[in-house]
Image (tube, rainbow, N blue to C red):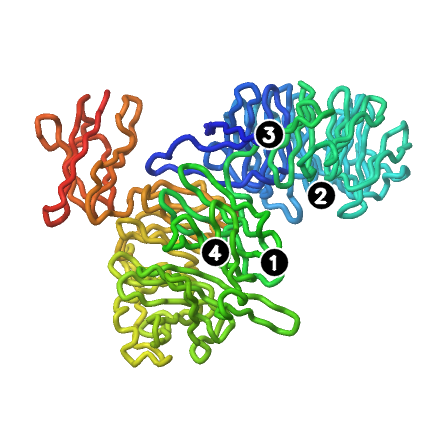
């Protein structure tokens, strides 16, 4: 299966956007393809290798198809990719040693190396092809795959006495098979019937390659090219002149070497060099070749139509259709600039991604990304490149919906409008309300989180300062609140509850702080009232019944009585609030909810169900009260790229659940949307009409919360009844008796639980 995305052309820059919403219960990826590691020319298209997947560009049709774990691949974290023109096979190796063979978009998985227990290095470094077989250069030897049979054909252990030996690359000269190692090259006659016997291989110990790390091998015009690495940025390409004689050819920061029948293409990061059959420089493509482009080539190759393709470090796939002039295009699917996820914030029918970090030695550019109308828009970082880093949280400015306020764990509060930074709030323009933490020469204005209240004020945390809670009032004025005598740790999360307007904030300790926005403040001990002692609060969310759900290092706790926050006075003392465990029974065994999981994040959907992310166990969906586990998604049973969940946000309009992991962002179309206080004038159903080939669920949204829904035929006879999940009802297209309905128009009648707020819609059903 592949997913086709449509093409948008902006001047010389091309991007791709998704064309439609996903169906209920379906997944989609939101991986970054800004940084490409390799371009792989195939017959009439080109593949671009990102960190977590591939995209394939058809230059004739001007379309792109995605290939990720969601579409048809079996893993993430790609290590290398290669294409064989003879068998039409794309071989994909992953960092965990899993292998996919893709032939005509059908993927065949070979997981033998991944599953095999091998002591030491079993990574796959390069892939070569010969005689309809794929040769994998592995950390323990060479693995040969029979492409036709889709299975491992043989394994060569080339160390002394047949032990493990790391192989970096493999090449085939007219007479020999050559293997590059960290100690020079080894070779064997092609006609030798037993290449799996290590003693049949000759180890070159006399040439200039002896005892060098040979990391890349190519055969061009029947001549072997061997690349040795002397350090991170220092390589030498040697040409084989016969016998044991090699001559140094090119020295520098070599990123890749590729060849065609007539040319050798060498990427040296800041330039791409093209050499003819005599190994003489034919063309050099670098920044001076263009009027606007900055060269940062990770890999380059020429296709059979003589077009130059470059895997760029930040511009995706770059095309020089005629590399002697300035005709440049850049291509990449719509997505965030990177796969870094720190925090996700719900936003209309999409999400806002904040990619920052709180590590003092790690600076993440202010790459705020917004997903709306099925398209990603990234912040224009040119205006804030040197002024803002590590964006941890974003809130829509309630006084101007066209603006966002972004919390920077270094520089203050950034104002974003039309995807550009237009202002930065810090000491200078807030009357020192926002103030930096200093220690010696170190300075950091640690604004960690932001949240708006119902009065259009925006609240911020200002960590490690006496004024740890800060507000920008709706009139634009700033005010700080002294928290020094209560707060004992760094704070970088905040929640404004929708009932009492209390501000709940917390950080890296085992306390939750609460402030009424005026004078009262208290702190909550998560172990007060709990049967299970915990030592870390990771997240706090408010559900639709004003309960606070707390994610800890040992599962879930709940605050049911938020109104008692200041019962002891609110003078900075311990609040009497209790944090309660949830007991549930499974197979007659009573347990605390997710007691064995480190809960990293929680989101509440329109039906008041909880989506719970964990540090190592994937995602759990539990019922409104937590007593029923409804779903559990992990790497093993879903397209999740990682079981380490960083953040979850749910689109209020569509119910799409965005899941940020340690390896990028994916989303899942849930069954619940946020309800309205009054029913929408036009109830929306998707798909509508329902065509004969469609057998999935039909989503009907726009209801009041948990509305009672009846679906009738044209004669008024009820064929199906259900209750909405939040503001959305699900119909499987069948009657209450489980029979698919006949062709016709069906009417949707709904009312709230009191029989009021009646809403009507109709759905065309075609068989």
Indicate the quadrant containing the C terminus: top left, top right, bottom left or bottom right. Answer: top left
Report the Cα–Cα distance between label 1 and label 4: 18 Å
Q: What is the crowding at mark 2: few (fewer than 14 residues within 10 Å), some, or many (at least 20)?
A: many
Q: Going 52% across and 39% down the picture, which residue do you hit?
A: 75
Mark 1 or mark 3: which comes first in sequence?
Answer: 3
* Depth order, front residue of 338/530: 338
Which residue has dot 1 on it? 362
Q: In what element is the residue under mark 3?
A: loop
- Determine the image quadrant of residue 314: top right
Q: Left or right: where does residue 354 sit relative to residue 218? A: left
Closer-to-camera residue (206/658):
658
Q: For numbered disc 2, what is the local secondary structure?
A: loop
Cα–Cα gap, marks 1 and 2: 37 Å
State the mark number for residue 406.
4
Pair 1/4: label in front: 4
The reply to whether callout 1 and callout 3 are in contact (CB within 8 Å) is no
Marks 3 and 2 close (CB-CB < 8 Å) = no
The residue at which mark 2 appears reads as: 164
* Of pointers 3 and 4, the one earlier in the residue sequence: 3
């Amino acid at each position: 299966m592949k997913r086709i995305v449509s093409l948008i052309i902006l001047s010389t820059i091309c991007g791709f956007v998704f064309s439609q919403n996903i169906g209920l219960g379906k997944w989609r990826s939101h991986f970054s393809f800004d940084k490409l590691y390799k371009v792989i020319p195939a017959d009439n298209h080109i593949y671009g290798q990102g960190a977590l997947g591939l995209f394939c560009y058809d230059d004739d049709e001007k379309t792109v198809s995605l290939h990720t774990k969601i579409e048809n691949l079996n893993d993430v974290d790609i290590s290398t990719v290669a294409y064989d023109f003879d068998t039409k096979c794309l071989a994909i190796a992953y960092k965990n040693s899993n292998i996919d063979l893709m032939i005509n978009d059908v993927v065949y998985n070979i997981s033998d190396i991944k599953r095999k227990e091998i002591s030491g290095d079993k990574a796959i470094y390069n892939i070569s092809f010969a005689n309809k077989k794929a040769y994998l250069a592995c950390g323990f030897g060479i693995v040969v795959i029979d492409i036709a049979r889709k299975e491992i054909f043989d394994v060569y252990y080339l160390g002394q006495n047949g032990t493990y030996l790391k192989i970096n690359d493999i090449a085939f000269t007219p007479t020999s098979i050559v293997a590059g190692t960290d100690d020079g090259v080894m070779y064997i006659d092609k006609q030798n019937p037993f290449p799996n016997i290590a003693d049949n291989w000759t180890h070159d110990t006399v040439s200039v390659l002896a005892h060098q790390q040979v990391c890349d091998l190519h055969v061009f015009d029947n001549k072997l090219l061997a690349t040795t690495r002397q350090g991170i940025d220092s390589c030498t390409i040697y040409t084989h002149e016969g016998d044991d004689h090699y001559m140094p050819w090119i020295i520098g920061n070599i990123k890749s070497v590729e060849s065609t029948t007539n040319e050798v293409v060498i990427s040296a990061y800041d330039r791409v060099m093209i050499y003819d059959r005599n190994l003489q420089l034919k063309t050099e493509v670098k920044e001076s070749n263009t009027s606007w482009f900055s060269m940062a080539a990770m890999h380059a190759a020429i296709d059979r139509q003589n077009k130059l393709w470059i895997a760029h470090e930040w511009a995706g796939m770059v095309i020089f259709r005629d590399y002697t002039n300035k005709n440049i295009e850049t291509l990449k699917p719509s997505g965030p600039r990177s796969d870094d996820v720190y925090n996700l914030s719900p936003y209309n029918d999409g999400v806002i991604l904040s990619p920052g970090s709180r590590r003092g030695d790690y600076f993440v550019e202010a790459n705020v990304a917004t997903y709306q109308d099925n398209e990603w828009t990234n912040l224009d970082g040119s205006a804030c490149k040197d002024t803002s880093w590590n964006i941890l949280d974003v809130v829509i400015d309630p006084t101007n919906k066209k603006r966002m306020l972004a919390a920077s764990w270094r520089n203050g509060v950034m104002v974003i409008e039309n995807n550009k930074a237009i202002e930065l709030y810090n000491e200078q323009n807030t009357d020192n309300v926002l103030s930096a933490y200093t220690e010696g020469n170190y300075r950091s204005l640690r604004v960690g989180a932001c949240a708006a209240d119902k009065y259009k004020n925006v609240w911020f945390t200002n960590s490690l300062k006496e004024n740890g809670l800060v507000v920008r009032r709706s009139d634009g004025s700033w005010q700080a609140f002294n928290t020094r005598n209560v707060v004992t740790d760094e704070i970088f999360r905040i929640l404004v509850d929708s009932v009492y307007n209390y501000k709940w904030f917390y950080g890296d300790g085992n306390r939750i702080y609460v402030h009424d926005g005026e004078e009262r403040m208290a702190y909550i001990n998560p172990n007060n009232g709990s049967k299970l002692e915990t030592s870390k609060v990771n997240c706090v969310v408010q559900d639709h019944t004003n309960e606070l759900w707390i994610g800890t290092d040992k599962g879930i706790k709940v605050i049911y009585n938020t109104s008692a926050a200041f019962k002891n006075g609110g003078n900075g003392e311990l609040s009497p609030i209790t944090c309660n465990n949830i007991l549930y029974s499974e197979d007659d065994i009573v347990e605390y909810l997710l007691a064995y999981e480190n809960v990293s994040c929680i989101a509440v959907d329109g039906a008041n169900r909880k989506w719970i992310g964990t540090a190592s166990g994937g995602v759990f969906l539990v019922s409104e009260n937590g007593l029923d586990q409804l779903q559990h998604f992990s790497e093993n049973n879903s397209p999740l790229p990682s079981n380490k969940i960083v953040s979850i946000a749910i689109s209020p309009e569509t119910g799409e659940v965005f899941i940020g992991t340690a390896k990028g962002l994916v989303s899942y179309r849930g069954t619940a949307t946020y309800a309205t206080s009054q029913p929408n004038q036009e109830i929306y159903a998707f798909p509508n009409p329902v065509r004969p080939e469609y057998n999935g669920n039909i989503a009907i949204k726009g209801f009041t919360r948990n509305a009672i829904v009846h679906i009738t035929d044209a004669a008024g006879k009820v064929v199906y009844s259900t209750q909405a999940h939040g503001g959305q009802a699900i119909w499987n297209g069948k009657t209450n008796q489980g029979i698919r309905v006949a062709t016709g128009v069906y009417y949707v009648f709904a009312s709230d639980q009191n029989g009021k707020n009646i809403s009507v819609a109709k759905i065309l059903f075609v068989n």
